[in-house]
Amino acid sequence: MREYLNLMEHVLKNGVKKEDRTNTGIISTFGYQMRFDLQNGFPLITTKNVHFKSVLHELLWFIKGDTNIQYLAKNNVRIWNEWPYEIFKKSDDYQDESMKEFIERIKNDDEFAKKYGDLGPVYGKQWRDFSGVDQLKNVIDGLKNNPNSRRHLVVSWNPSEIKDMVLPPCHMMYQFYVADNKLSLQLYQRSADVFLGVPFNIASYALLLQMVAKITGYIPHEFIHTLGDTHIYQNHFEQVNTQLKREPYKLPQLIIKGNQSSIEDFKYEDFEVVNYKHHPHIKAKVAV
């Protein structure tokens, strides 16, 4: 994953200091692209441990069209916890509960989860119901029946519903491409948190590409990751420099078991990452 280290070096060298929505402070560049050939291995960052369980559960959650964190909480996936917790803390129901206590209530109290666990019409809603259109189903049908189309697109940026989302979509649009019986996917990401978010985004969309390739009969080829505002938070500099001192290992392989025929057929148990050798986890705080 030298491509990812090159990205961090590019932002450190060329980034401009800016203020940001979270008041954390960033250095930022605009416009960057990485390419990953999946025949060379599954692009799971090796210079730190990436929690593949969270990547997989989040993607299955998107595919279901779900927008409530209860499913994630029940599977101990924490990547969306901060946003609903911050909303809860501003409510009249808040009684100084800790994040841990909040998540336990989300897990075990359906009414509480319904009230405080929903993120609004974020990714899953837009993928499966963009103003009544099931974009994911349509794009898969198109790949099977009209592979040369230039309209194999899924868009998460729905301007009329942005106001109702806890966070507007960062990875906002992706496009599939078929050539020589090979399937590629390009993601456009408007806002890219290089240290925390981007490793998850790479793994998630490479995983989606392999899933769609399996049910459409194509060979998974390239994941192309195009970034807009590409930034490193100022409180991640130490972590970035630690990671840059580490030498990448050989990429792991992703195995998908089973004979799935539709995108809804995939289950958590169908996936296995093998030979994932990685450096230790690096802890960092998410900016909310």
Image: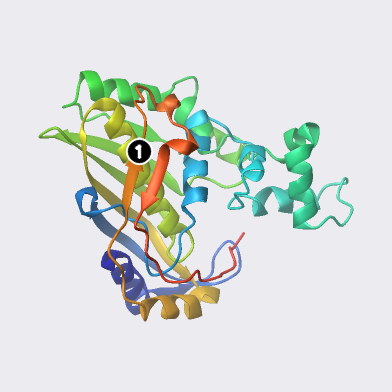
Q: Where is residue 126 in the image (x, y as percent from the top left)?
A: 49, 31
Q: Report the residue marked by disc 1.
A: 256
Query: Which one is in front, 257 or 114?
Result: 257
Q: In this view, does 17 lie above or below 85?
A: below
In this image, 103 relative to 27: left or right?
Answer: right
Can residue 13 be seen?
yes
Q: Where is residue 263 in the image (x, y as percent from the top left)?
A: 40, 27
Query: Which one is in front, 160 or 285?
Result: 285
Can residue 174 be seen?
no
Q: Where is residue 167 in the image (x, y as percent from the top left)?
A: 57, 47
Assess disc 1: are there few (<14), some (14-19) or many (≥20) residues with their C-alpha within 10 Å of its C-alpha. some
Where residue 68 sits, quadrant-wise, is top right
Where residue 14 sits, quadrant-wise, is bottom left
Query: Which one is in front, 133 or 45?
Result: 45
Q: Residue shown at 14%/32% (left/top)?
A: 181
Q: In which quarter of the image is the N terminus?
A: bottom left
Q: In this view, does 236 lie above or below 201?
A: below
Q: Where is residue 29 in the image (x, y as percent from the top left)?
A: 36, 67
